[in-house]
């Protein structure tokens, strides 16, 4: 039984890939309408990840060659380093791949910053225990660290103002929880994706989209319904850019909810100029003049760190950041063998042997 209480992958219908013939034997059927007649999605299942189905095929060739040479169990030390600076994330998932393996692992903490070429993870054990997982481990660390780094940049721009990740809609749903969890690791104050928040032991954050306003037909009716039907712990933050001038709509909603209104959200589309500092300044002034200084201004839509700084100066209080985080490029990670049979080694251009990093801590 594995550490998560589940049977090993071999007992759940998939055997770990060991040979090229194993690869040739994989048969995939898409689009079968009958129940159980085929897979619905192109994303990998947990079992496929654990069986090595998402690795590069050359690692299976390597495994088969080493097995035939009697060298598959050669003891090695591998180190992973990034090509550029960033914020570490993805360690928890990488350890999930290695949980049942006879290896020791050291890594820096999720949320820690790293410099180019810092060793962020070290794996020690027989090569056959982890070699085929090089591709998914690097991918997990690269993508998650890229998203965490972008979230850190957004949060640093926001300072003590709230930043919520709205990135799920910009990526494949299979990785949406990974993205938004990584954003919180990087510094975001919350996530809108339900599964991401639950993985973090939190509740998802967000109110309602424009769709409900268009169906109901009036912002005040939606605001009152939200106030009537949503639980008391759900902040009353209402969109105000669907039908009328944002300042006019904000005042209508504020009059309707009074002190119960926590904030108004500006998500003005680019077709109407987007959310500008001038709009935020005007809205802040009109709310204050009407006696609604307690109402916060929440902004979303195409935000970057520079825009966040400008909007804070104008009076914005909180931000929903999506595409800036979701579009962050992965931080290229490289895995090198640094010892083989206890002897320091390296490819040409690299330094043989372990490279120390005081941030590394044993995690497995």
Image: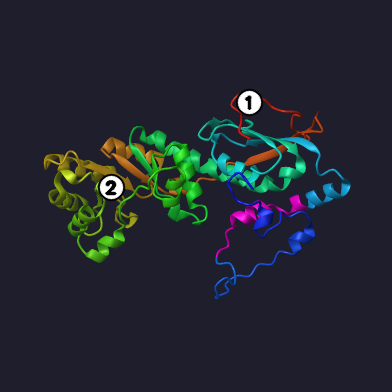
Q: Is residue 113 left or right of residue 271?
A: right
Point out the image quarter for the C terminus: top right
Q: Is residue 54 magenta?
A: yes
Q: Is residue 63 left or right of residue 109?
A: right
Residue in view at x 20 percent, y 46 percent: 261
Q: Name the residue under label 1.
A: 357
Using the image, tell me which numbered label, if any, was put on residue 90. Answer: none
37 w.r.t. 285: above or below? below
- Residue 271: quadrant of the picture: bottom left
Q: x, y percentage for residue 219?
A: 20, 58
Q: Is residue 28 left or right of residue 167?
A: right
Rate crowding at label 1 as few (under 14), some (14 to 19) or many (20 or more) other CA atoms within 10 Å. Answer: few
244 w.r.t. 290: above or below? below
* Among the two numbered marks 2 and 1 on one chain, the one whose residue lies closer to the N terminus: 2
Res. 330 in view: no
Q: Mark 2 points at which residue?
A: 234
Distance of label 2 from label 1 (alpha carbons): 44 Å
Residue in view at x 41 percent, y 51 percent: 194
Residue in the foreground of this view, choosing between 354 and 107: 107
Rate crowding at label 2 as few (under 14), some (14 to 19) or many (20 or more) other CA atoms within 10 Å. Answer: few
56 w.r.t. 185: above or below? below
Residue in view at x 49 percent, y 56 percent: 173
Circle 2 sits in a helix, a strand or a loop, which is it?
loop
191 w.r.t. 341: above or below? below
The magenta segment is 41-60
Question: Which residue in the rendered view is the most extreme toward the bottom?
Answer: 34
Q: x, y percentage for residue 298?
A: 29, 44
Q: Does the magenta stretch include residue 201?
A: no
Q: Nearer the viewer, mark 2 or mark 1?
A: 2
Q: x, y percentage for residue 128?
A: 76, 44
Circle 1 sits in a helix, a strand or a loop, which is it?
loop
């Amino acid at each position: 039984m594995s550490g998560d209480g589940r049977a090993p992958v071999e007992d759940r219908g998939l055997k770990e890939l060991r040979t090229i013939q194993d690869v040739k034997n994989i048969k995939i059927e898409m689009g079968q309408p009958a129940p159980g007649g085929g897979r619905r999605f192109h994303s990998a299942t947990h079992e496929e990840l654990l069986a090595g189905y998402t690795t590069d095929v050359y690692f299976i060739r390597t495994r088969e060659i080493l097995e035939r040479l009697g060298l598959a169990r050669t003891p090695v030390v591998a180190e992973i380093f990034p090509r550029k600076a960033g914020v570490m994330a993805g360690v928890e998932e990488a350890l999930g791949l290695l949980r049942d393996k006879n290896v020791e692992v050291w890594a820096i903490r999720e949320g820690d910053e790293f410099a180019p070429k810092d060793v962020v993870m070290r794996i020690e054990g027989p090569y056959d225990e982890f070699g085929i997982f090089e591709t998914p481990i690097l991918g997990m660390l690269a993508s998650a660290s890229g998203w965490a780094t972008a979230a850190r940049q957004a949060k640093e721009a926001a300072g003590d103002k709230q930043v919520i990740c709205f990135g799920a809609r910009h990526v494949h749903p299979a990785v949406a929880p990974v993205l938004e969890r990584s954003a919180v690791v990087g510094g975001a104050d919350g996530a809108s994706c339900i599964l991401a928040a639950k993985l973090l032991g939190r509740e998802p954050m967000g109110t309602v989209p424009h769709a409900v306003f268009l169906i109901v037909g009036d912002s005040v009716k939606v605001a009152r319904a939200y106030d009537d039907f949503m639980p008391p712990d759900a902040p009353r933050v209402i969109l105000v850019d669907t039908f009328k001038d944002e300042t006019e709509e904000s005042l209508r909603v504020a009059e309707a909810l009074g002190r119960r209104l926590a904030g108004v959200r500006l998500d003005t589309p680019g077709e109407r100029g987007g959310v500008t500092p001038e709009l935020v300044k005007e809205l802040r002034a009109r709310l204050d003049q009407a006696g609604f200084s307690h109402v916060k201004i929440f902004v979303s839509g195409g935000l970057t760190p520079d825009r966040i700084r400008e909007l804070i100066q104008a009076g914005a209080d909180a931000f929903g950041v999506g595409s800036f985080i979701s579009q962050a490029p992965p931080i290229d990670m490289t895995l090198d063998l640094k010892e083989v049979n206890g002897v320091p080694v390296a490819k040409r251009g690299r330094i043989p042997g372990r490279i120390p990093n005081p941030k590394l801590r044993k995690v497995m």
